[in-house]
Structures are given as structure tokens and as C-alpha cells.
Amino acid sequence: MDFSVSSDIVVELLEVAINLILYTREIYPQSVFQRRKKYSIPVQMCIHPGLRSYISECVGSIRPVLEKGEVEKVIVAVLSTEGVPVEKQDPQLLRMEEALRAFCLKLSISDSLLQPLPPGCSFAVHIQVPEHVPTSLSTEPQHQEFPWVEAEKEQTEVHDPHIVPLKTLRTEVCKMQLYVEESSNKQGSND
């Protein structure tokens, strides 16, 4: 796994987490925050140039140590007017990074757990969405260059599937399961 990529993910998550902590704990006036979308949810991000720069520099300076795997924990401490910690928040993003790394490592060895593929396979990316989403995807200008097309049922269902569990991920931040629906007869699936 590329540690710089996983470090980028943790740094971005950390920046969002710090902004949310500052906003929800009202450490700065709510007027210096603006609603933005991150990870497909609305979050409050700082728009004050000085504070935004400070947060960015703080989390950016952590990146090299993250890439070396030398950070044990990142804590956001809330300090009193005397500079004494009155609250510590641990977003536990490093555990998330470890979990994501384990997830990717399991993906990289999943071939040994699955039947061989028939020759000449290709791939497609399918997304499962609520019924109203295909309409919005087809009408939004940013999707015109790469339009999504609704797949036919036979293009999305595996014939006579059995489930191969690869990895279960449980952290304080999220729960995910990685599994493969594998056709019982891969070699005969092109008939």
C-alpha cells in the first residue's frame, strides 16, 4: 500500500475533523465557517484565511511523520484561557488508516481466495443508487463527459453466486465488509 496515499486520506480526514470540532464546540464564531460538502455530507469548514491556513499547515506538517508510520495518535486539545487542556478529542483516524491499509492488503491477496477468471475478462463499475438518482446523474452538467448508464439486470447479477468473505472492518469510525459474489461456474459463464 502506498503510505503517501493513505497519509493523504488521513490528513484530509483530520482537517475535516478539526474544522468540525472547532465549529461544534464553538471555539470560533460560527460566522467564520461555511457549509461545504465532504464525503457526500455537509460539513462546516473554516473560511477565515488565517485560521484555515493554520489548520492546513498543522495537518500538512503531520504528513511526513504519517508516511513513516511514526504517529501513534492525533489529539485535538481544547484549551482554557490559561492554556490548560479542558477537553481532548481523538478522532481515531490512525486506527482508520490501519483499517484501510488492512482492507487494501486483503484486496491485494484476494486472488488466492477466488477461482481463476475465464480468459478475456473486462470490467465495469456499477453503483447502486436510489431510484431518483439516475435522473439527476443524467441531467447534471458535470456528468455529461462521463455519463452513467442504467445497467440491465443480467449485467449486474452473478449467476448462481456464493459469497467469499474477504475482510470485516470494525473501527470506532466505521464498519465495512469486503466480500466477493463469485459465480459457481466462472468458466462456463461466457456461454
Image (cartoon, rainbow, N blue to C red):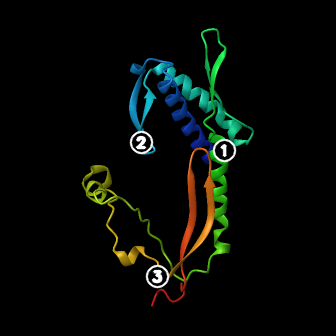
Q: Is residue 2 visible?
A: no
Count of numbered marks: 3
Q: Nearer the viewer, residue 59 or 162?
A: 162
Give the side of residue 107 with respect to residue 150, left or right. right
* C-alpha distance separating marks 2 and 3: 35 Å
Which tag, 1 or 3, sits closer to the chain's start? Answer: 1
Give the residue at mark 3.
159
Residue 175 lies, in percent from the top left, at 57, 52
Relative height, residue 177 to residue 59 (above, below) = below
Amino acid on which the number 1 mark rests in the picture: Arg
Give the side of residue 90 with respect to residue 30, left or right. right
Residue 66 lies, in percent from the top left, at 68, 39
Residue positioned most to the top: 82
Q: Nearer the viewer, residue 25 or 152?
A: 25
Amino acid on which the number 3 mark rests in the picture: His
Residue 162 lies, in percent from the top left, at 55, 77
Residue 123 lies, in percent from the top left, at 47, 71
Q: How busy is the neighbourhood of tag 3: few (under 14 within 10 Å), some, or many (20 plus)?
A: some
Give the residue at mark 1.
95
User: Residue 180's quadrant in the figure?
Assistant: bottom right
* C-alpha distance separating marks 1 and 3: 37 Å
Which tag, 1 or 2, sits closer to the chain's start? Answer: 2
* Residue at point 63%, 39% (across, down): 92
Q: Are marks 2 and 3 in contact (CB under 8 Å)?
A: no
SS class of the residue under badge 2? strand
* C-alpha distance separating marks 1 and 2: 22 Å
Q: Are marks 1 and 2 in contact (CB under 8 Å)?
A: no
Relative height, residue 189 to residue 57 (above, below) = below
